[in-house]
Image (cartoon, grey):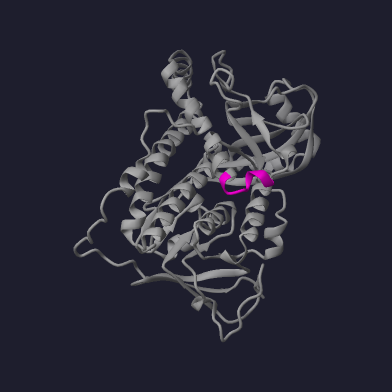
Amino acid sequence: MPDSSASLPSPADQPGELPQDVLIVGAGPAGLALACALADAGLQVTVLEQQSSERLAEPAPDGRDIALTHRARDVMRRLGLWQRLPEAEVAPIRAAHVSNANSPRFLRFDAQAADCEALGFLVPNHRLRRVAYEGALARGAAVRLLAGWQVREARVDGDAATVVAAPAQGDGPALTLRAPLLVAADSRFSITRRRLGIGANSRDFGRTVIVARLAHEREHDGTAHECFRLGNTLAILPMNDRQVSAVVTLRASEADAWMALPPQAFADRVAEQFGHRLGAMQMVGERHAYPLVAVYAHRFAAPRVALIGDAAVGMHPVTAHGYNFGLYGIEVLADLLDQARRAGRDLGAMATLAPFELEHRRVTLPIYLGTNLVVGLFTDDRPPARLVRDAVLAASDHLPPLKDAITRQLTGRRPGWMPDLRKLVAALPPLPPLPGRPTMPR
């Protein structure tokens, strides 16, 4: 049967009839961080999640370590989530090194040269999930978490969005929830997005990512390495306590053989591919494998609907922007909904949501397309592509403006001249209704 962090209402007091301004589907780190932001803005939020509350409260390590930018860290700080992370679990990235197969050319980024304390901060994904859950619970009655429910239907009916959910495990009566605004935050394979008829561009790279934590002999000096090898890509991410997170991206057909290696044989293979620069390596914990699929939704907002996190943009991990984009979107959307609440405007109207669509697309689309282009180039092992890669690395290293632009994307810092587009758009008068605008599909 489904469960909740708080007791469910009685059948006579149906959850769908309780006051709620926003209904969020998905209690991952993006959905729960948005719930925290909206609660802080004075809104009543319900979060619907398929997993049990026990799994949400104690998420298991999944091998993924997330690189957060300065802007993402600032968002988490304002939500009181960063402060909940154990200091020992936050590893600064002081430099980044990009290499191309056996070429002597490489590209290096340095925090000191960029005049910042670190290029970014690595945090285990399960820690991010846990602090987001704790933060949501700390908002008390403003955030109602309903765990153990699976979406069966999602639709828009005039002045409200409706979700019909069923118990994720076992049998039981369906649950109907209505709110002025529905937010899909249920992964890049979002069921809610599909139920609402919102499509997405999806790119299956035909690759599998294997992640594992490794201990090693020599100091890594806080340097992250992205090694575009012939046949596979190896990322070495510097964690604390003389450990690294190894991320091996290879053809899906080769993943089973890598996963079947004994732990020490796997560690030895990673050490060999990294040129033994950190000495001998040993496995710490388990390996995990994930299919590599990138997703970009056709729309981030529609009448009474918004998409956040991977449901909006699911990135290839090479540029480490996945959760960062989620937090950027949360910052923009929560600010707009706060303004709408204060002005007494409809939370789910397109006049309220349009600036979020515009700003989030402006921030994410160039990086999404650029990342896919870079991945295509740097995983093409044909000789012409290898020559182009060498030229790209050489040009990037010798053009300070280009290198500075890449550094800004790594850190999440805006250049001083760039306007905050969402504030410019929010200052415009409300948009008139579009003649003949089709309704959302049921």
Answer with left or right where residue 294 lies relative to residue 85: left
Please tell me which residue is depicted at 46% across the width and 20% down the height of the picture: 403
Q: Nearer the viewer, residue 13 or 227?
A: 13
Q: Residue 240, can we see it?
A: yes
Q: Which residues are magenta?
A: 78-84
Position of 175 relative to 420 (above/below): below
Q: Is residue 429 left or right of residue 118?
A: left
Give how far across and how far down residue 159 sits, in percent: 35, 71
| Viewer-side residue, 281 vs 143 | 143
Residue 122's image quarter? Answer: top right
Q: Quadrant of residue 148?
A: bottom right
Q: Is residue 206 visible?
A: no
Give whichever of 333, 363 is nearer the camera. 333
Question: In this picture, is 49 found above or below 72?
Answer: below
Residue 225 in the image: x percent, y percent?
62, 26
Q: What residue lies at 51% left-to-right and 57% top-to-bottom? A: 38
| Left or right of residue 423, residue 374 in this image | right
Residue 52 among those drawn in magenta: no
The quarter in which the N terminus is drawn is bottom right
